[in-house]
Amino acid sequence: MRQLGISILGLFSGLLVGFLITEAIARPMLADGGQIPDSVPLGLLLGFGPPILAIVGILVALRIDRKLQRDKRSNSKG
């Protein structure tokens, strides 16, 4: 149950970072000329960035939690 909570926290954190990065890229482009250039890599970044960072957020959160749990167990034994 703990890993599920940590995974959900990582998911939302990753999505938040993904949307912030997307806004940081898209907003200046729209402010400059109002036209987003037709670029396939840019479109892929804007489209797939938040979901990919959500998955990365899950993996990072689980890894950090495992490391903290391992450190806590090793400190309590010794």
Image (spheres, rainbow, N blue to C red):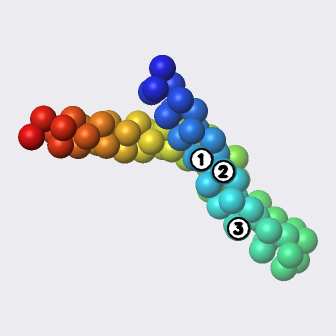
Front residue of 24/76: it is: 76
Q: Amino acid at mark 1?
A: Ser
Q: Amino acid at mark 3?
A: Ala
Horizontal side of residue 68 vs 62, given as left or right = left
Location of residue 8 with respect to 30 vertically, above or below: above
Residue 36 horizontal/vertical position (percent): 81, 65
Front residue of 58/31: it is: 58
Residue 7 horizontal/vertical position (percent): 51, 32
Dot 3 or dot 1, earlier in sequence: 1
Q: What secondary structure is marked by label 3? A: helix
Q: Which residue is mark 3?
A: 24
Residue extending farthest to the left is 78
Residue 65 horizontal/vertical position (percent): 37, 39
Q: Amino acid at mark 2?
A: Leu
Q: Which residue is mark 2?
A: 16
Indicate which label's residue lies in the foreground, 3 or 1.
1
Location of residue 32 with respect to 50 vertically, above or below: below
